[in-house]
Image (cartoon, rainbow, N blue to C red):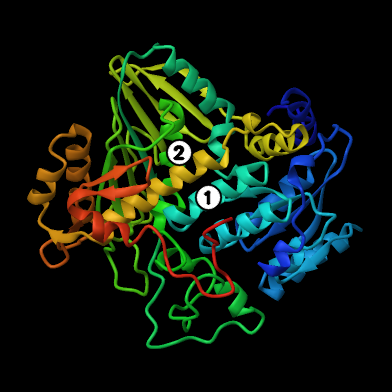
Amino acid sequence: MGQLSRRSFFKKTLVTTAGVGIMSTMIDSSRSPVLGANDEIRVAVVGFHGKGAQHIRVFGEIPNVRVAALCDVDEDVLQGQVQKFKDRGEKVAAFRDVRKLLEQKDIDAIVIATPSHWHSLIGIWACQAGKDVYVEKPVSLNVWEGRKLVQAARKYKRIVQAGTQNRSDVGLRAAKKYIQEGHLGKVLWAHGLWYKRRTSIGKVPGPRHVPPQVDYDLWTGPAPLEPLRRERLHYDWHWRWVTGGGDMGNLGVHQIDDCRFVLEYEGYPDKVMSFGGRFGYIDDGETPNTQMAIFNYKPAPIIVEVRTLPIKKGVRAMDNYRGVRMGNIIQCENGYFAGGRGGGWAYDNNRKKIKQFPGDGGGTHQANFIAAVRSRNVDELHADVLQGHISSALCHMANISYRIGQQSPVEKIKESVSGYQDGVETLEKIKAHLEANEVDLVKTPIVNGPWLEFDGKKERFKKDWGYEANMYLSRLYRKPFVVPENV
């Protein structure tokens, strides 16, 4: 960003970018006024043990935006952030129960950075309460509830932005334009990858004590109220199916969304498959730590791959693909783009650099949300909730294929992906990667998920595996934390 300060950058961006308790506070959202550039927008951040802390800082730096309220079920986390406001001489309201927060009529927008199993429900409640919403990825834990969030946004005429922030990155937006103008020729395939080291979360002999400062009933919310069966309550919820979607739903969603954005894919592919496993250790995690999914878009398929093991056993360094460790490869006839968040480069097929697309350093996505909140124009959003829903749903679809799959030898998996050159090559690389980590694929075979055909209009699986796969499209909700059928 050079000599341009973050606050000045936000100001420039904004100028140029045009439950029973919940239901009792519903407003006629169709009357939401268009806010001027000098009108203060009061934001509440819900959940900030991780990403939410960054949102507190970034939203607080946007001109005429005030972080007016905080909500977290962990009293220590909550009071830690409250103290930071006190140290700066700033006032902020504090809540542990999001329902109480949403009753506050002086809050304009809610930023949701809770565990994934809460995202859709809080978003729906917020829409019903007349609040605009910035919801972190994935916007849902399953396909059905994500669609309900979209319906709520439309019904109550709310501005709802998904936290797939790469759509706002100036580098990726410029690369998309360059590719769509045909400078590299026809797109052949897209490959999203996220190689991030993760170690075992450990294996406990029995239920653990919930930290005393946590309201576990509120933390659990819509999920089953089960004993804590992992060492850490926080963050490791990602690797349990009742609260998270593994790294496909956690980080793979960015790569799926980036590829869809660059290729201008607005809807669903006609089918999807995924394979992988949890390799290298035995712990209390359920989700795969190595996974690949193929989304059968036409004319160019999207492949997304996540790995959490290192280059080989005994080292910490991670693999890369064409120099990219976390990002995307968009392969075209006459070259390819490699990059993602923070921009990237266009290369010819001899891997010679052609053109750079510098990134902007982050923060523009939140500014884009605030600009749309002021204008009341959903079309100004870079990541409207509908597109956030579809990218999240693709993660869920890939995970469903994996969850109903069977352990298979590599040769059988190769038959499943035989129509996709990049898929076959990636399978071979994953095999070599696992062997370098001393994984015995005879004793611990890869789980091969079936190809699942999908009806994008009905958001249902079809034919052979439809019945079994459709069971994972929704869940049972624990009262009173129930996603409503009619939002």
Question: What is the crowding at mark 1: few (fewer than 14 residues within 10 Å), some, or many (at least 20)?
Answer: many
**Quadrant the C terminus occupies:** bottom right
Q: Nearer the viewer, residue 282 or 100?
A: 100
Give the image location of residue 144, x and y in percent.
44, 55
Residue at 40% from the left image edge and 11% from the top image edge: 183
Q: Say whether residue 138 is visible.
A: no
Of all residues, the one furthest to the right in this rendering is 89
Q: For mark 1, give the secondary structure.
A: loop
Q: On screen, 255 above or below 306?
A: above
Name the amino acid, label 2. Answer: Asp
Instruction: Tell whether 381 sits left or right of 67.
Output: left
Residue drawn at x 47%, y 22% is: 176
Residue 287 placement (x, y as % from top left): 35, 63
Q: Which residue is mark 1?
A: 137
- Looking at the image, how many numbered discs can be counted on the residues? 2
Say whether marks 2 and 1 touch (CB < 8 Å): yes
Residue 94 sits in which quadrant?
bottom right
Q: Quadrant of residue 256?
A: top left
Residue 135 visible in the shown view: yes
Q: Is residue 341 above or below residue 91?
A: above
Viewport quadrant of the N terminus: top right
Q: Residue at x 44, y 43 (%)?
A: 391
In the picture, the disc for residue 22 is: none
Q: Secondary structure at mark 2?
A: helix
Residue 180 position within the rendered picture, expressed as x and y whole percent measured from the top left: 43, 17
The image's mark for residue 257 is 2
Whether 77 is drawn above or below 313: the answer is: below
Q: Look at label 1 and name its amino acid.
A: Lys
Q: CA distance from mark 2 to mark 1?
A: 10 Å
Image position of 238 (left or right of 423): right
State left or right for residue 136 relative to residue 3.
left
In the image, residue 69 lies at what x, y percent? 79, 59
